[in-house]
Image: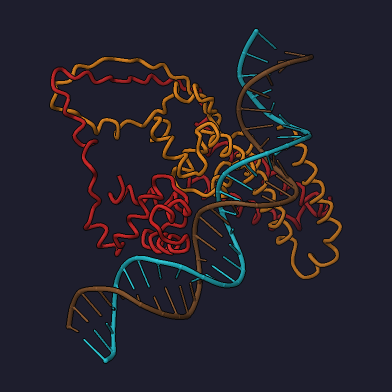
Chain colours: A red, B orange, C cyan, D brown
Amino acid sequence: MKRHVLIFGLVGGLLIATLQYTEYRFVVIEHSIELYGALVAVLFAAFGIWLGLRITRRREIVRERVVVREVLVPAEAPAPLATDTVPFAPDRAQQRSLGITARELEILALVARGFSNREIATQLFVSENTVKTHCARAFDKLGAARRTQAVLRGKELGLLP
Amino acid sequence: MKRHVLIFGLVGGLLIATLQYTEYRFVVIEHSIELYGALVAVLFAAFGIWLGLRITRRREIVRERVVVREVLVPAEAPAPLATDTVPFAPDRAQQRSLGITARELEILALVARGFSNREIATQLFVSENTVKTHCARAFDKLGAARRTQAVLRGKELGLLP
DNA sequence: GATGTCGTCATACTTTCGCATGATTTTGCG
DNA sequence: CGCAAAATCATGCGAAAGTATGACGACATC
């Protein structure tokens, strides 16, 4: 896809150069500048459309995907839900390396569970501003700009279940 | 879609007319004809690309046949990482039962990936308002009041990875 | 006792979200 | 073709969320 852009640039440059070179020969002599502009416009518009088609071409295929949903039927002992039952332990090492405090993580967990700042504040008996502060610090440490992003990062890093 | 072509033509004509009108004023006076050509070229290329992307927006119709295959599991090898390797297929049944459209789910997935409405709008070549509308409908169908909640519900219901 | 971290809170402001509502367009389908 | 479902977009508004900055007390530690 990057190649297309490159080609685009190259051909564009070539075209301009060519036109620039030849304009004094026969283009401008016979016709006016508007024809020249229109020519360039049409060519580039067509090229742009072609480019747009090209880089998004393969997507409108009507695919028929066969999804094999394998239903696990336990033979005798279930026991694979152990990991689900476990209370989940956040990656403390990761947490420490990012400098995320316990409180921040606590609030982050509540954010991840879909609570609003106000709801979190009520649950923890603190002011909404405090929640915002913790959030802001946590977001900063996680390199997130939004709570959804922060939650995503938190899960990726093993900080959240 | 026909309107786009019309707009294209109109704006193109206008642009050319404008340039044609103003060229003798300040464009050509200061700069040469190649700058004029380059300007037209860039503008039209951008417009063309936009148009190309716009009218060939991914229309991914996925018809999938769900084959439920019961597999006997030896009761100790749970193999839970299979779900991570699989490209992930949202629970279409769940989606249908909730009346969530493909577009809504698509946007929901981007929300889950931490993008803002504006970013999503840019990615999908639609207006921010449209994204908001899709979001609102999806949230409503999911019974969520916030995007974090919606993401949570979506994952619970097998709609999101 | 100075230093540093953490938690708490506030104020002021900007940006983003979400809701309601209505309108137009596009599209899939019988 | 015509209809219904989707998708698109707009506007206006209030509520959240997020940013920046400063402050203050508790507590641990050196």
Residue D5, percent across and down? 62, 22
Q: Nearer the viewer, residue A20 or B112?
A: B112
Against D24, is B26 above or below?
above
Residue A86, horizontal then vertical, whole percent? 21, 40
Q: Is residue B93 left or right of residue C4?
A: right
Q: Nearer the viewer, residue D1 or A70?
A: A70
Q: Position of residue B160 (x, y in %)?
A: 41, 34
> Horizontally, is B1 left or right of A127 in the view?
right
Residue lying at 64% horizontally and 56% vertically, measured from the top left:
A17
Is residue B6 shown left or right of residue B83?
A: right
Look at the image and tell me in which quarter the N terminus of chain B lies. top right
Q: Foreground residue, A97 or A26?
A: A97
Residue B28 found in image quarter: bottom right
Task: Tell me which residue sits at (31%, 62%) in the image.
Answer: A100
Total numbered labels = 0
Q: Is residue A1 visible?
A: yes
As drawn, A102 above or below A82: below
User: Residue at coordinates 37% horizontally, 31% vertically from top-left?
Assistant: B88
- The correct choice, above or below, for B74 with respect to A4 in the image is above
| Picture quadrant of residue A95 | bottom left
> Where in the figure is residue A15, as x and y percent of width and height?
64, 51
Name the residue rendered at 43%, 36% in the picture: B153
